Image (cartoon, coloured by chain):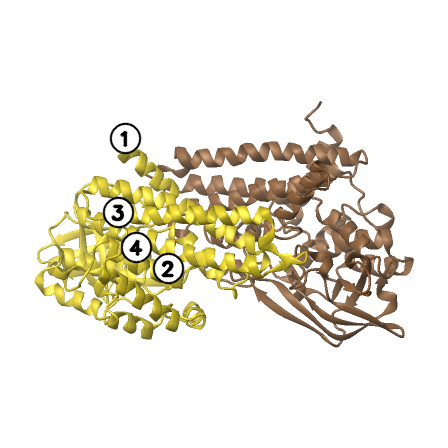
Chain colours: A yellow, B brown
Amino acid sequence: MNFELTDERQMMQDSLRRFLSDRYTTQVRTENLDSDAGFNADIWAQLAELGILGALFPEAQGGYGGSGFDIAVVFEELGRAGVVEPLLDSAILGGGLIAALGSSDHQSLVEQVIDGTLHLGFAHGEPASRYDLAHVETTATQSGDEITLTGRKAMVVNAEAAGFLIISARETGAVTDEQGISLFLVPVDTSGLSLRGYPLMAGGRAAEVELDAVTLPISTRLGIAGQAYPVIADRVAAASVALAAETLGAMETATGLTCDYLQTRQQFGRPIGSFQALQHRMADLLIELEQARSAVINVAGHLSAAPRKRDLHISAARNLIARVGRLVAEDAIQLHGGIAMTQEYELAHFAKRIVMAEHRFGDADYHLEQFIDLSAA
Amino acid sequence: MDLSYSAEEEAFRAELRLFLAEKLTPEMAEAVRLGHGLCKEDYERWHASLNQRGWLAPNWPREFGGCEWSPVQRHIFEEECCRAHAPRIVPFGLSMLAPVLQKFGSKQQQDHYLPRILSGEDWWCQGYSEPGAGSDLASLQTRAVRDGDSYVVNGQKTWTTLGQYANWIFCLVRTDTTVKQQAGISFLLIDMDTPGIEVRPIILLDGTHEVNEVWFTDVRVPVENLVGEENKGWTYAKYLLTHERTNIAGVGFSQAGLAAVKRLARSQQHRGRPLIENPHFAARVARVEIDLMAMSTTNLRIISAAAKGQAPGVESSMLKVKGTQIRQEINDLARRAAGVYAMPIASEAVEGSNAAPIGPDGTATVTAQYFNNRKLSIFGGSNEIQRNIIAKVKLGGRA
């Protein structure tokens, strides 16, 4: 047993933490939330320069990391700083899918993601799919050398900034079959593809994507026809590690702000942190925070396990972190009082990051159900 | 024991339903149901409809133009209004200031201000909290110094709900700094148009502008705007707070919220079935519904006791804690039910927005409401303060 980070990961954590505390100021974050783009292009370029995007890919794909622990270290730091830049969407999901399935012609796109010059979006979820990864109603119909996509994709994060969308569509099978789903690499300016963009509560932007007979050459298909599901599940597992770690980081900041506030805010002639009722609640948050930290370690260590075991750990971590996240977000606000209800005070942003993470790839109930199914089997 | 309403009460309910069906426009009800931000005119229009019918002041005595309804009637009124998605009655003038004026105000103050509250001529806001005086309200610092026929007021109030619409504010101010905190507070009525007053918006975490800071710089207030006696303001403030706590359980809001959660969960699919059939989700909905059924009876028990003239004591603190827990749990369920469509910013929650909805019906403002209603357990005496009150009464001053 060894719970220490390797030297390389420790250095990465240190340099990322330093960079974010210097450069990712409250002002940058606030400007991001008010901006049309939803994130800051300079910060993005600097994260690429620091090698943070490369740390999310294995060496064989042009990076120098890519394991569960690499992802966890990076995303915990992003979470601590409340970063809204789309590393999850452009790198873990978009870049990861192309790297896993793309032909050698496509690999230069992965290099562009790693050097920070290309954004991607993963257009998979649909209005009726909720969190079911196999639910794909969008159809892909082949005719000679061409393929035609028709359907609607929901909540495609980072779609407007993306050069390409990786779009899932069904070639065969019933709506919820794992078999029969393919992925297509689609330039966003393709005719028939339209976006309706909107800002997100926790920062960043997403879009509803309408696919009205989008016709593409067959070469845009990533991998073998109808066989994309296992790779989608693998990348969503990596995204789940990232979300769990990011939420952990955001909870560290939220609890840190709360500890500070309890020691400084005076009511009834003394710091409110001297009241035992509040002390005990703060103590509970700190206990749960350590539970969350262990859940992230568990899941990061099982990202490359066999799918069943991996998914059991994914659901365990995401269920626990969703529960703890709600507790931390709500109690951090409550322990602060009115000040935490304001947009201006930075806790608001962290509370939103924590709670909204639950809505990507499965909430507490969904993962509880998954866990029950997987652990009973 | 008899859990049923009397024939008269049922007739009253029927009369209310008729009125609501006639006077509440479908557009207004839809806006309230979907959690859209209402503008000042929306509230004013609804107040006017109620006033025309003589129902704007359920809790006022008849001599002042009120309904003098029984507590049970008021409960039915609140329940029916929530059920029909009527806008809430803005409470600051009607249910907070008015009872104070009726009990402690001068005849001139009653004659002048009360009719203007009913007619909508005056929109009142509340100047209680300060940046340094939240849970510890008695530590408030805003100063009023007597100078001839005026008080000169300096200081800052905060969390002033809908202060941006108000033309009058009732304030707690410090008039004596040499005595025990509670003994040096007075209750002043201040015209918001007086020079030296500045209202600054506070944007809440869901993006809405609901509360404000109000700054006072050498604001001259005529002495006749003092309510009751100088330095007795704390007594009036406490009296007001007991009125703030009527309907503190929010049973009607919770009932409407629960119905909305069920409607949403029926329309959302999970693994090919309506979400409402999912055992995990259904169990949570059932638990909160069970809690709500019990709480609404607790509420009625307290209301019945009040109807017999017993003043509610710790019970109102109990209702505040349980009532807000239930409402917040319902908000959490609504957020979960919305799935990925809980993620967008709800521009609809912001007054005057006309954005077309992104997700399915009933999802647009669930997250905004989830975050916004975190305030329920903070304002009006935080739930921790309520627990202190309960413990102090039951454990005998040792809390």
Q: Which mark is residue B117?
A: none
The answer to whether tags 3 and 4 share a subunit is: yes
Tell whether label 3 touches label 1 (CB within 8 Å).
Answer: no
Q: Quadrant of the C terminus of chain B?
A: top right
Q: Which mark is residue A79?
A: 2
Among numbered discs 2 and 4, the one appearing first in the sequence? 2
Looking at the image, is mark 1 or mark 3 nearer the viewer?
A: 1
Among numbered discs 4 and 1, the one appearing first in the sequence? 4
- What type is the residue that disc 3 sits on? Glu
User: Helix, strand, or loop for circle 4?
Assistant: helix
**Which residue is the site of mark 1?**
A376
Q: Which mark is residue A137?
A: 3
Cα gap from disc 3 to disc 2, whole angstroms: 33 Å
Q: Chain of mark 4?
A: A
Q: Position of residue A334 (x, y in %)?
A: 55, 52
From the viewer's perspective, is residue A130 above or below residue B282?
below
Identify which residue, B351 or B161, lies in the foreground: B161
